[in-house]
Amino acid sequence: MKKLFILLSVAGILLSAQVFAQNRSIQFEHGTMAGILAKAAVEDKLIFVDCYTEWCGPCKNMAATVFKEDSVADFMNAHFINVKIDMEKGEGPALKKKYQVQAYPSFLLLDKNGKIVFKFIGGMPSNKFLKNVRKGMNPENKVAIMNQQYANGDRSKTFLREYIKLKIEMMETSSAKEIAAEYFEMLSPEERTLPENWFLFGENRYSLYLSNIYFGNNFNYLAEHWQEFAKTIPIDSIENKLGSSFRKIADYCLRGWYFKERPYNKTDFECYRSWLKNTALKDKEQLITLMNVAQAAGEKDTTKVINLLADNIASFSEENKRILFGFLSMFESSVSTFRKNVRTSEIFEKIIQTSANNGLVDIAKSYQKKLTSK
């Protein structure tokens, strides 16, 4: 009995020690940024800035987990002046603009003068977080070096290609677009079509910012000059980019998203159809029809949208049949209007009869039932 008591006591002590050992967290300073900079100068430390917002889920998760791990807390408290800043309150908006914070959470390492020396983005486990922090502590880190190169006037094409990509990785997308536009103008027509410059035009991790349907200079250039690109870029890559972009235009128009960024302009859709006619896309006639659907959505001509889809959706490829999702968004915005048009049911019926996508068929069946429900 005595031995059992001793074992239980030892176990209790160890458990208490373990609990005690896991109750530390990053110590965040309070006060103005000027005060933080002054303290960093006195203590000769870098500043760690957690850029967050109240609505950011990953920000809350980092605060509740990673920032409360002992290994993280001990390291950060020993090496940094730590500060949390809500980017939507107090000094936040000004600092957001200064440091080009465009995604949350964003983590900054600043020197005692407030100059950014490293930046990384997003929620992550503690080992990756500390790996990024240690990388940023190196004065020879990639971010610091490339920022300085650009500030010193380096405009070599090799450097600019990598710098544009770095800016996007740090979610400094406004700068990335400006530098990409600068770089584009430096290139000859022949250089623009080279494989190393495909990142400006193609379907890749950078396309959301450099060649999307809203900021379309690069997309427009590809659509107009696809034959020149075909000499150096695989035709499948070109067709995938063009096809996905035109489908996205149609989908976003039906959902209403497109016109929040670009007010309706008939000329846009005339231009899209003209480009499509000059491509070698296998489904270009279907895509032209989708541009007609998109234009009808821009004109708020619901009847025309319904008729175009009812007349054509059965012959669409499986990929193009997915325009149903955009149509459903439009349907949900005005259920009574769509119920009054008998051809709405025809769209769902044709999906059910012709699509090999079981998920799409199930959705069409559910909406067909919704049409007849009260």
Image: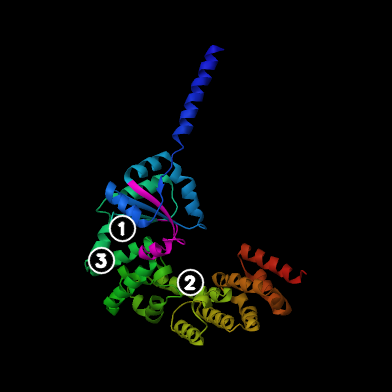
Q: Tell me, yes or no, whether the highlighted magenta stretch contains residue 253.
A: no
Residue 291 x %, y %: 53, 81
User: Which-is-in-front pick, marks 1 and 2?
Assistant: 1
80 and 323: which is toward the camera: 80
Residue at position x 28%, y 75% from top? Answer: 191
The residue that mark 2 highlights is 244
Q: Which residues are magenta?
A: 80-106
Residue 173, above or below 271: above
Residue 48 x %, y %: 36, 51
Instruction: Assign the N terminus to one quadrant of the image.
Output: top right
- Give the structural element (helix, strand or loop) at label 1: loop
The residue that mark 1 highlights is 114
Task: Name the quadrant containing residue 163.
Answer: bottom left
Which of pointers 1 and 2 lies earlier in the amino acid sequence? 1
Q: Visible in this render: residue 202?
A: no
Residue at position x 58%, y 84% from top? Answer: 299
The residue that mark 3 highlights is 150
Furthest residue in direction top, as rendered: 2
Residue 53 x %, y %: 48, 58
- Callout 2 amino acid: Ser
- Give the structural element (helix, strand or loop) at label 2: helix
- Callout 3 amino acid: Tyr
Residue at position x 58%, y 76% from top? Answer: 254
Residue 262 x %, y %: 49, 79
Rounded to the nearest angstrom, the CA distance separating label 2 from label 3 is 34 Å
Q: Tell me, yes or no, whether the highlighted magenta stretch contains residue 105.
A: yes
Badges 1 and 2: C-beta atoms under 8 Å apart? no
Mark 1 nearby-residue class (10 Å; few <14, some 14–19, many ≥20): some
Q: Visible in this render: residue 235?
A: yes
39 and 373: which is toward the camera: 39
Mark 3 nearby-residue class (10 Å; few <14, some 14–19, many ≥20): some
